[in-house]
Image (cartoon, rainbow, N blue to C red):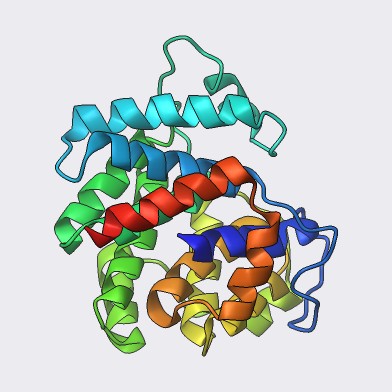
């Protein structure tokens, strides 16, 4: 889960296609900050803990709505999309058929929480459906969580890539370099997931995956959050990145991260 949050923090200053379109950049600067990607990831983590490891669909979705509205209101200026901003303050919020990448950027806690691929995919879909109930929004969340589960289960990148292509149908033929040369900002799952997946598959370490993700430009914080979640599950996070990244995470967010780490160890 921290893999997604550090990716968000590192990519935050380049969001909206502000560069660097290169793998050569300083990871952490005083211009970095966490964004809605991190806030909503924490919200999903809290929801999963409140629902319990065996929570059914009604319990998980109910807790997701409560936690997402709670944390969204605590951090109202974290950079939410327009429709989601209204969803956060509605008394009876309903899904709005979004295919945006928000469903995938917040799903990383699911990738760590469960002991089967089937359960991981099921719950990932539930966390998406409270807002992003469009098939592409659900697919993006399920794919992200599935890659994480397979990576932490010891599957090779070749096996994971074959599974992603056969199960989700994403086109992974474009390279990181080609995306960098044709950078553009796009917040859809259809654009973001292939980019995050290619960054992950081409990378050789957590740091390298993050650099790949950000070098493509566009919605850098979210691409790096999704790719970073996958890379964390495959490689782990270097201590120095964790030490630096934690400096940008607020105390209340860090408290949930600590509780969730204990939750997934049980």
Location of residue 210 (image quadrant)? bottom right
Image position of 101 (left or right of 125): right
Please report the residue visible at 30 percent of the width from the left and 75 percent of the height from the top: 152
Give the residue drawn at x 28%, y 57%: 264
Quick check: 32 above or below 125? below
Q: Nearer the viewer, residue 145 or 172?
A: 145
Identify the image quadrant of the N terminus.
Answer: bottom left
Q: Residue furthest top?
A: 91
Q: Is residue 151 shown above or below 140?
A: below
Q: In which quarter of the view is residue 183 placed? A: bottom right
Image point (73%, 82%), residue name: 23
Residue pictured at 29% horizontal, 44% vertical: 125
**Visible residue check, residue 225:** yes
Q: Quadrant of residue 252?
A: top right
Q: Position of residue 69 (x, y in %)?
A: 50, 25
Instruction: Return the x and y of residue 41 as percentages of the image width and height.
Output: 48, 47
Front residue of this view, candidates 174 and 110: 110
Q: Is residue 54 left or right of residue 42?
A: left
Q: Is residue 10 left or right of residue 100?
A: right
Evaluate whether residue 171 shows in this view.
no
Q: Position of residue 195 (x, y in %)?
A: 55, 69
Picture coordinates of residue 194, whole percent (x, y): 50, 67
Check the picture and name the quadrant holding the C terminus.
Answer: bottom left
User: Against 194, is 122 above or below?
Assistant: above
79 vs 16, nearest the viewer: 79
């Amino acid at each position: 889960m921290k893999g997604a949050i550090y990716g968000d923090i590192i990519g935050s200053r380049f969001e909206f296609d502000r560069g660097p379109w290169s793998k050569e950049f300083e990871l952490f600067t005083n211009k970095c900050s966490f964004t809605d990607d991190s806030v909503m990831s924490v919200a999903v983590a809290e929801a999963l803990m409140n629902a319990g490891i065996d929570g059914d669909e009604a319990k998980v979705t109910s807790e997701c709505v409560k936690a997402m509205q709670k944390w969204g209101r605590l951090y109202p200026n974290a950079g939410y999309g327009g429709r989601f901003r209204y969803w956060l303050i509605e008394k009876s919020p309903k899904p709005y058929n979004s295919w945006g990448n928000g469903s995938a950027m917040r799903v990383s806690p699911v990738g760590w929480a469960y002991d089967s691929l089937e359960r991981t995919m099921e719950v990932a879909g539930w966390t998406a459906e409270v807002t992003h109930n469009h098939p592409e929004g659900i697919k993006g969340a399920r794919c992200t969580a599935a890659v994480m589960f397979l990576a932490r289960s010891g599957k090779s990148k070749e096996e994971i890539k074959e599974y992603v292509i056969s199960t989700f149908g994403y086109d992974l033929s474009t390279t990181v370099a080609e995306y960098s040369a044709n950078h553009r900002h796009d917040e859809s799952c259809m654009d973001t997931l292939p980019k995050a997946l290619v960054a992950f598959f081409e990378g050789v370490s957590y740091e390298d995956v993050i650099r790949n993700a950000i070098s493509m430009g566009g919605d850098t914080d979210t691409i790096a959050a999704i790719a970073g979640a996958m890379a964390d599950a495959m490689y782990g996070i270097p201590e120095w990145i964790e030490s630096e990244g934690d400096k940008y995470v607020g105390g209340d967010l860090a408290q949930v991260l600590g509780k969730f780490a204990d939750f997934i160890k049980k």
